[in-house]
Image (tube, coloured by chain):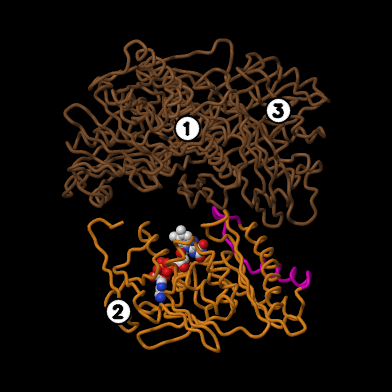
Amino acid sequence: MPALNTVGHSTPRIDAVERVTGRAKYTNDVQLPGMLYAKVLRSPHPHARIRSIDTTRAQALPGVKAILTHETTPVVWGAGGIAGGQQYNDEVKKITKHRRYAFNNPVRFVGEPVAAVAAENRHIAEEALRLIAVDYEILPFVLEPEAALESDAPKIWPEGNIAVNNRNEPLPITQKRGDAHAAFATAPHVFEDRYSTSFVHNAQMEPRSAVAHWDGDKLTLYTPTGGISNCQHDMARDLGIADEKVRVVCHYMGGNFGNKNQNQDGDLITAMLAKAAGAPVKLEFSRKDDFIGMHGRWPTVQYYKVAVDNDGTLQAVQLRGYSGMGPYRKNSGAIGGIELYRCPNVDHVVTPVYTNRTVSANFRGPEFPQGFFGIQSMMDDVAYKLNMDPVEFGVKNMSRMFRDEVPFTNFTLEECIRRGAELFDWTQRWRPLPGADAGPIKRGAGFTYMLFRSGLGMSSAVVQVDANAKYTLFVGVTDVGAGAKTTMGLIAAEALGVPLSQVTVVWGDTDRCPYSVGESGSRTTIMTGYAVMEAVRDLKQQLAEKGMPTGSQTLVAKASPNPRLEGKVRNAFGAHFVEVEVDTELGHVRLTKYVAVHDSGRIMNPLTATSQILGAATMGVGMALHENLVYDQKSGQPLSAGFYYDRIPTHLDAPTVEVSFVENDDGYGAYGAKSIGESGIILSPGAINNAIFNAIGKRLKDLPITRDKVLGALA
Amino acid sequence: MLHGMTTTRYEAPGTVADALSVMAAHPGAMILAGGTDLLVQYQAGLRTPSAFIDVKRIPELMAIEADASGVTIGAAVAAADICAHPVIRAWWPGLVDGVQLIGSTQIQGRGSLGGNLCNGSPAADATGALIASGAVAHIAAPSGVRTVPVEQFVLAPGKTALAPGELLVSVRLPKPAAHTADAYQRLIPRTEMDIAVASVAVSITLDPSGLCTAARVVIGAVAPTPLLVPEAGAALAGTTLDAAALERAALAASAAARPIDDKRGTVAYRTTVVGVLTKRVAAIALSRAKER
Ligand SMILES: Cc1cc2nc3c(=O)[nH]c(=O)nc-3n(C[C@H](O)[C@H](O)[C@H](O)COP(=O)(O)OP(=O)(O)OC[C@H]3O[C@@H](n4cnc5c(N)ncnc54)[C@H](O)[C@@H]3O)c2cc1C
């Protein structure tokens, strides 16, 4: 793979100075003349019908300018439900039964918006919330997905608690090949087990906020979003106006991790308050609002059944999985993992279920960390039971083609695993006999591997040059944290053959930038990056034909490519190796070595790529050992909302991660770039769990692996 | 958070006497030291004082005085100043173990010893070591000054021996006897910025031959208040802190624990680990005492 001039060299982010000096303007820094402040009243009940809402006392409070409730504002929040893994559109909106409004009646989880107020200042807005009298009829509730499927469970929707897809069908997600049932009957070894994962909040640094103002019939919305184009379209659809009547602006944002894609109910509420009040409005969530009002990762229960031959060859895998979605199906609720294994017989049935908890939806690698934890703990266990080294078992049984059918554009999984084992010193650190260390502090090693989608798709970019050879790149990215502004600049500079300093990047404003795919699914570099390359190609052609512009002229090129793969699947690959030290008297788990090897194609910016893996692996540590939005089973109240109660990892909890990239260029995407942002989190929970097993000889099965669970397993 | 349109007074008296009269004039007022407990509780709507009485302008509350027989630590002295004090570091390494665990660098710049004690938490990280070393609290009351041993200071979660209108002025630690040392450890769900699920402070005194002549064991976060466990101390006294003695002390500590189940730890877990910590902390105190 030949080296390039600009792409591939460690480059500080082009907005780093603004960010660290506090000059960067985030949404909550936006101040507009005459701006009002909004607050949202949230349901204190997990499930209740609103008999009546009396806002007269709040209306009478001086300084209150607008109040919205489900009675005054029956607006559907399209992206908030019934996505079913697909984009919500007008057709779906028309037929959908399980509509999610900005304000719903009944309310179906603690924290669901009931009313919103805009007032001259925050204190008045808060006081007004206290003056709103809501008469609730308390309804029975259910918190856990399996319990919600019992015949006598309270019904969250009249049709029942299986979450419906966007055709209103209560169908599980299934995948079948071969005949697993027959294989279980004849295979020499069959193993069964149950694993579970918890609700983990995205815990992005910046809580959600929005500022909206209307100029006549045109809305300007400042909001932290990973996709200004999606957000614009969603807002227009929900408000029933044309796309060009909505301008979305996001210059800086403090993290996304999946819960700032598309538009959010806070955006809609702010826009509607601004309309009702006839003045700009700002809404800022508290951390608690953000924890219970926004979504997190769907919790899962996973029942596996696995058949293997005497030589350790997989014969069949069966999964019966249940995902707790909260009361709306904002995203798929799938459980990934089957695709990691070559296996002739697969029977995979995952049921997304409504519950009266905070909504679950996409969070960094939506369905994978849960599923990879489950299936890779399961397979690790099978390897030990067959007296095989888990690494050898993995290499023997890993997929070499997508679903054993479709070839990958390139395949480096084995190389990732072998390199990781070597860097980690697997043969030295792994204990053939689990729990063999003497004394109360025991060490052990574990590993997991992954594949992750890196598909191609449509996006666009505009590039322009003036008479002074100043290049301006217009891209609809916002930079969720993965450095998109800088990456787009690097790609443009590379394609133009000029230094990065000669390229000005304009981002984050739908009035100035062309459509861009949202910054989710680790796809911006692949898709928008490729559009940048195409726009530059066009510009260079124009330059060749017309020469450099003169005077006040500019040359402009736009590209909206929609490349496709024929007969191939494009994936990123990776393997993580973890060593832990378990204090078997206190149950404490410490990470003593962590090696992460990834094939993410060509690495655009090693500095950012490495920090993506570090950050993601650390998030995975939180999921593995700490985080869980705990609910009181009796009252249905969330008990652990917030960074403190949820035990988000601190710097001292973060492992030192040694990152290594297996680089290559398969000829697709921007210079061969593949996905990277989500990959790092997918592997850590399973790798940590497998290392704990190797250290103590006991298999933990339920996330998070808190210390009392470790002691419980040892007791 | 301002509660609606109501406002809260702020007073900053310069003497203990003035502080007492401001308190008398504002029933429902609360003392403000570093504010790292109080302001968080206030913003969460858990406390609604009629006034804040900031005590950081009162010299006695802001001073550390060391003399031949001990050290007096002003109630509002910040954790960072305590940890930096050479005499405290030399005589009570276990107190420093605890104080330096409080929050973060930022929190330690403001959070005080008095605040840690008066907040009345069973999990407070400074309280255990104070009790282990036999510290006493100096309290200013309208009727004069009174002293209370620290082990009698915390009565229930959030409730202390202070009567309304009283003020903690300082804490006095008597100079440790020869061959005496203390130690403190806590267990938290994550590695920093957390509240103890269980904690243990131990102070032991050895005779010149290395035999333990006296021991005080205090357990935290496993009962409504920090608990001095005399049975655990008795299990160590008269021994060389051999494995059997440590085991007996651990059993006594676990037996004395009366923890609750909460989202940070279960009853069974807390009961077990407070015993494990007792052994480990006693061993640290022993090695420190041997160096004296
Ligand atoms: C992020 C964070 C992390 C924390 N981590 C820890 C930790 O690890 N361990 C730990 O133990 N604590 C921790 N705390 C709690 C807190 O920081 C400590 O308890 C600290 O010692 C409190 O001191 P302060 O001066 O800030 O008290 P303040 O908040 O000022 O006061 C606390 C209480 O004591 C009363 N009070 C204070 N001084 C007096 C006085 N002289 N007389 C009478 N009453 C008085 C106040 O009225 C109030 O009720 C943490 C707090 C935060 C915000």
- Residue A475, quarter of the rendered image: top left
Q: Which comes sooner in the sequence, label 1 or label 3? A: 3
Picture residue at 44% right of the left edge, 20% below the top: A533
Which residue is identified by label 2?
B24
Picture residue at 39% right of the left edge, 70% below the top: B33
Horizontal side, residue A113 vs residue B187: left or right: left
Ligand 1 lies in which image quarter? bottom left
Picture residue at 43% right of the left edge, 80% below the top: B63
Which residue is identified by label 3?
A305
| Circles 3 and 2: CB atoms closer than 8 Å | no
Stretch of the chain drawn in magenta? B242-266
For the residues tagged 1 and 2, is the chain the same? no
Q: Marks 3/2: CA distance?
A: 71 Å
Which is in the foreground here, disc 1 or disc 3? Answer: 1
Of all chains, the one bearing label 3 is A
- The answer to whether B78 is drawn above or below residue B208 in the figure is above
Which residue is identified by label 1?
A361
Secondary-structure class at tag 1 = loop
